[in-house]
Image: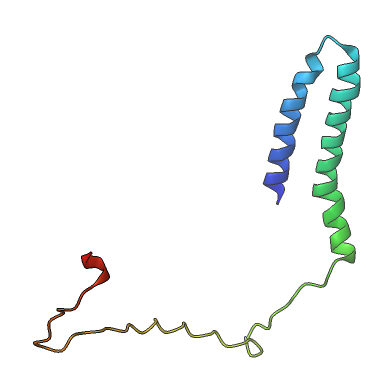
Amino acid sequence: MFAPVLDGAVSTLLGVLMLAGSEFDFIVRYFFAVLAILTILGVLNGLVLLPVLLSLFGPYPEVSPANARNRLPTPSPEPPPSIVRFALPPGHTNNGSDSSDS
């Protein structure tokens, strides 16, 4: 969880960093500053605020007993499908017409 969020933020900030070198002041002010601040706020939101809120108000953790008495049994694997084989009786030849002969 930590690495993908941080990787996304770093790559976004590297892309936005190119806007900081612009000669136009409005590009730096309205694009670079806004995108950099939003990226930093998004990282703080995803790595600090949301985990703290989920630990306080989220669902209770699921606990399984150590002796595994209340667990469901592991299902056995399904048997492989049966193979149907058709064979001609000995001495029988296929003299009839077949659609692949035409």
Q: Is residue 40 above or below residue 96?
A: above
What number of labels is visible? 0
- Which of the 4 image quadrants contains residue 90? bottom left
Q: Is residue 46 left or right of residue 80?
A: right
Percent across and percent down for residue 80 are: 39, 81
Q: Is residue 52 above or below residue 70?
A: above
Q: Is residue 69 left or right of residue 46?
A: left
- Which of the 4 image quadrants contains residue 23? top right
Percent across and percent down for residue 42 are: 83, 42
Q: Is residue 13 above or below residue 66?
A: above
Percent across and percent down for residue 16 are: 77, 26
Seen at 21% across and 84% down, the residue is 87
Seen at 18% across and 85% down, the residue is 88
Residue found farthest to the left: 91
Nearest the viewer among 19 and 56 is 19
- Which image quadrant: the C terminus? bottom left
- The colour scheme of the drawn protein is rainbow
Nearest the viewer among 91 and 36 is 91
Percent across and percent down for residue 15 are: 72, 26
Q: Is residue 62 left or right of residue 66?
A: right
Nearest the viewer among 11 and 84 is 84
Q: Is residue 33 left or right of residue 3?
A: right
Seen at 62% across and 86% down, the residue is 68
